[in-house]
Amino acid sequence: MGTQATLKKISVQLNLSISTVSRALKNHPDISENTKRKVKELALLMEYEPNAYAVNLRTNKSKVFGLIVPAISNLFYDSFIAAVEEDARKNGYSLIILQSADDPLQESENLKICKLSRVDGVFISLVPDSHSDQLYTKFQESGIPVIFFDKVPGNKLFDTICMADDEAATIAANTIIKYKKKKVMALFGNPELSITKKRRDAFLKVFKKEKATIKVDIHYCLSSSAAQKVVTEAISKKSRPEHIFCMSDELLIGAMKSINQSALSIPADISVLAISNGFIPGLFKPEITYIETNGYELGKLAIKRMLENMENKTPVKSIILPARYVQGGSL
Amino acid sequence: MGTQATLKKISVQLNLSISTVSRALKNHPDISENTKRKVKELALLMEYEPNAYAVNLRTNKSKVFGLIVPAISNLFYDSFIAAVEEDARKNGYSLIILQSADDPLQESENLKICKLSRVDGVFISLVPDSHSDQLYTKFQESGIPVIFFDKVPGNKLFDTICMADDEAATIAANTIIKYKKKKVMALFGNPELSITKKRRDAFLKVFKKEKATIKVDIHYCLSSSAAQKVVTEAISKKSRPEHIFCMSDELLIGAMKSINQSALSIPADISVLAISNGFIPGLFKPEITYIETNGYELGKLAIKRMLENMENKTPVKSIILPARYVQGGSL
DNA sequence: AACATTTCCGCAAATGTTTGCGGTGGATAA
DNA sequence: TTATCCACCGCAAACATTTGCGGAAATGTT
C-alpha cells in the first residue's frame, strides 16, 4: 500500500521523464529500444501496474460493463452471465452485476449505479412494469451502448437480443396439435412482459386455425408456487387437462411438483411440454420434452454485439436466436 | 458526453471556487446554508454526478468488491452471489464477478484483474489445485481483505466462511446408520478439495465406530455425468447398494438420472441422501432428503464479514454456518 | 559547411476531485 | 482602538496517467 510503483517512481530511478516511461511501456516508436528495455526491466522489478483510476480518468473509459438482471439465481440468467463474463474477460473487460429483484425502482437504481460507475456499456433484461425509459435512453444519447436481452422494450429503438419467442411457441403449439391433445392447459408468466405476450400470441395463433376442436386454457402465473397451485387445482377436477404447456422453467418446476404429488403418470395420464433452458427438463422421469432457450448462447451473442459496438457504432439491430426442439419422454 | 457537469462548471456559473462547490455538496460545516442551497440547486439542474474515476484516484478507494467463483452457473454459487450483491449494493458497493472455470491459471488471472481494477476487497472460492497463494497473500499484505468461502485454503491464516462440513457429513452418516442401511455407496467430489476431505473424513469417522457391520463404498466423481456413470454401474450389479449418499447437488443430479433410468424405486429399492443447496432435491419424486448447505445465507455472512473489515481491520476469523436436516421421502 | 532530416526525449496541460491551510471581513470583547 | 474570534471561502497541491508539441542531438544530404 505504502509503496505502490508509479510512472513517477520509475522515472526518478532512471533519470527519465514520466512521459518517456509511459511511452516506453507502451512501445511508442519515439522511444529507443535501449531505454525501452531499461524501463521495462525496472517496471517488472518494481511490479509496476498502471493505476486504473488514473487511466480511466484520463481516457474516460473504464473497461467495465454493467449487467442488470431481474435475478442472478436463475438458471437462465446465470448461464447468460457466465457466457458474457467469459468473452468479456477475454477482451479485457470486467462485469459489474446488479439484480433488480423484479422491482422497477431497484432497476432504476441499478441503471444509476451503472451511470455513476461510468461503465462502458450496459446489458439489461427488464423487470415487469419497468419505467426506466429515460434512464437508458440517456445512456444511448451519451454514446454508451445498451443491449437488451430476454425481456426487452416493446419498441424497436434499441439493440435487442432475444430467443425466437414466437418460433418457440409456434413449435410448441404445433407439437401439441400433432400429438392430438384436445384439452390443453397453458401456463404463461407475467402478462405485462413482452416475452410473455410474444409467446402467448404465437401460441394462440396456431390454435386459432384449428376451428375450436381444441380447448386451450391459459393461466398466468407469477411464480413457481403459483403454477403449482393452479395445476393442482386443474388436475383434481374430473375434466382434467390432457396436456400442460409451460412457457418457462420456473412454471415447469411448479407444474411438475404438482404432478409428482398426484397419482398421474407422464405421459400416459398427462403430457408435458415446456420452453426451457434445458437443465431442468433432464431431471425428471421421464425427461421433459422442451423447446430450448439457450441462455449461454444468448449471452455469447450479446457480448459479441457489445464488442462490435465498442469498435464502432453501428445502427440499432435486433438479433434473434432460433429455437430448437428437444425430444424427451413427456409427450 | 460533451456536456458532462463538473464541479468546475458549477463553480464558474456561481462565481465560486471548485472547493467551495465540492464542500457545499458534501454539507461541509464551513459553507453557509445559503450557498449550499444555491450549489445544490444548480447541481440538480445540471444533473451533476461526481466522476467516479476522479474520486477513486483521489481517495484510492473504488467501492467495488471482486468476487471469484469456479463457475457462476451453479445453484450454490449463484445464490451466494445473489446474497452478496444485495447487501453490497445496500452499502454502496458494487460487485465485479469473475469465474475461474475450475482452472488454476484462470484463477490467478482473475486475482490479477482484481488487483488491476484495485477492488476494495475480494471474495473467493478456490478451484482444485489452486496455486494462487502468493497472489492473495499479497492482497492481505497491502491491506485489502480477502474472504474465502466454500472452497478455502487449508491453513488458518485467512478469513474463511464455510458450511459446517463435518457436522453435515456427520448428520448424514448417522442418519444412514439410523435407517439401518448396510450397503452404502458414497459419492464425493474432487478429493483435492478441502471441502471434500472434510466431508469425507467426518463421514467415515462415524462409520468407523460401527465395527464394520456396514459396507461403505467411496467414489470420487468430478462431474455430474461421472456420478451418473458410477451409479449406473453399481446398481446394475447383483449386489447393488441399498443407499446412495451424495455430497453435493451436482453428484445428486447424476445419481438421480441414473436411478431414474433404472427400474429401481426410491426409497423401497434404494434410498438417497444428499448434502445440498435445497433446490434440486425438491424436484424429484419423492423429494430427496438432504442436509442443507445454504448458499444464500453463506453469502449474507460473507458480505457482513467484509463490511466489518471495511470498518476496521479485525483479526482473522473462521465462520461456520451450521447444517440443517431436511426430511424428504427418499430415506 | 550549411542545411535537412531523423531519432529520441521532456515540458506542460489536462482529466475531476479532495483537502490542508491560509485568508478576508465582520462581530464581539477588552 | 486594538485584539480576538468566528463564519465563510479560495489557493494550490496531490492523485497517476496520457498526449500534443517542441526541442536538442545525431545523422544524413547537398
Image (cartoon, coloured by chain):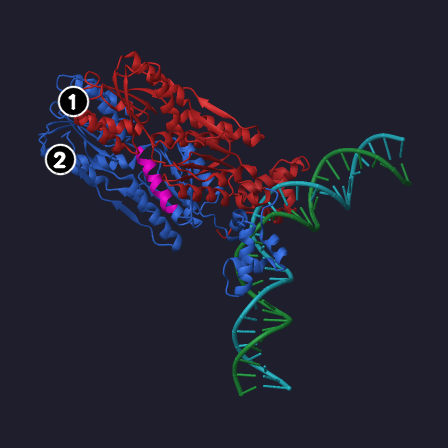
Chain colours: A blue, B red, C cyan, D green
Instruction: Classify 10 Å Cα crowding around label 1: few (below 14), some (14-19), many (20 and above).
Output: few
Q: Which amino acid does label 1 sit on?
A: Lys
- Residue A152 numbered tag: none
**Residue at (54, 64) in percent of width and height:** A34
**Chain letter belonging to callout 2:** A
Q: Is mark 2 on a helix, strand or loop?
A: helix
Q: Residue at x 65, y 43 (%)?
A: B20
Residue found 49% across the figure and 42% down from its top: A116
Whether residue B229 is situated above or below residue B106 in the rendered picture: above
- State the image quarter where residue B282 is shown: top left
Residue B158: % across, % down? 51, 31
In the picture of the structure, the residue carrying the numbered disc 2 is A175
From the top left corner, tell me how far across and down residue A165 is, in percent: 23, 39
Q: In which quarter of the image is the C terminus of chain B?
A: top left
Evaluate whether label 1 is on the same chain as label 2: no
Which one is in front, A173 or A57?
A: A57
Q: Residue furthest front?
A: B211
Q: How many labels does the image show?
A: 2
Determine the main secondary structure of the stretch shown in magenta.
helix
Q: Name the residue under label 1.
A: B238
Q: Does the magenta stretch include residue B141?
A: no
Residue D28's x, y, as percent? 52, 80
- Mark 1 or 2: in front is 1
- Range shown magenta: A75-88
